[in-house]
Image (cartoon, rainbow, N blue to C red):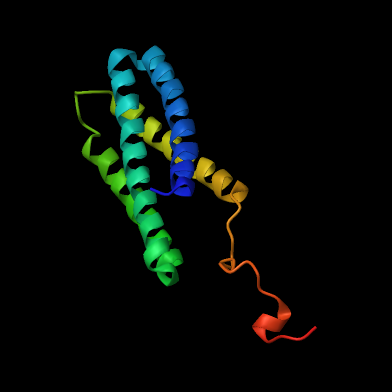
Amino acid sequence: MPSNDARTLLHTAVPTAAVGVVTVAVSAALAGGKGAIGAAAGTLVVILFMGIGLGVLQRTAKSLPHLFQAMGLVLYTTELLLLFVFVAAFKDTTLFNPRAFAAAVMVATLTWVAAQIRVHMKTKILYVEPDSSAGKTPENTGSST
C-alpha cells in the first residue's frame, strides 16, 4: 500500500476507533455489558467495511482512473446498504444490545466519512503528473519564449 493510501487509512480509522471507544463506554453505562459488546461489534463492522472499501477504491483509482467517481458512488452506496443489512440482521439478537450496535454503526460511519473528507481536503494531490526529466528547457521542448 503506497504511503498516501496508508496515511488516508490511518487518518480515517484512528478517529473512528477513538469514537468507537467512547461509544462502547457510553453503551456500557446505558445498557451494561451487552451494550458494550454491541457497540464494539458495530464499530468493528464499520472499520472493516469502510477500510476494505477504501482499499478497493484506491486500487480502482490507480488502475482505472476514468471509473473512479462512478466506482466511489457505487461503493459507498453498497457499503451503506450492507451496513443497513447488518443492522437489520442483528435487530433481534441476544448476543448483544441491538440498539447499541445500531447506534455504534451510525456514529462510526459518520465519523469515518467526516474523517475521510478531512483527509482528502488536506491531502495535496497533483492533478498533473510532473515531468520525469528535470532539465527541460524551451529549446529542448520546441516551444519559444
Q: Place residue 78 in its image quadrant.
A: bottom left
Q: Nearer the viewer, residue 104 or 117?
A: 117
At x 32%, y 47%, the residue is: 52
Number of numbered discs visible in the structure rendering: 0
137 sits to left or right of 34: right
Q: Is residue 67 above or below residue 76?
A: below
Q: Residue 87 location, x and y as percent?
A: 29, 38
At x 32%, y 44%, the residue is: 49
Q: Residue 63 location, x and y as percent?
A: 37, 65
Q: Is residue 65 above or below residue 38?
A: below
In which quadrant will I find the C terminus?
bottom right
Q: Place residue 141 in its image quadrant.
A: bottom right
62 sits to left or right of 141: left
40 sits to left or right of 13: left
Q: Residue 4 location, x and y as percent?
A: 49, 48
Q: Is residue 91 above or below residue 2?
A: above
Furthest-right residue in view?
Answer: 145
Q: Residue 40 location, x and y as percent?
A: 33, 25
At x 37%, y 15%, the residue is: 28
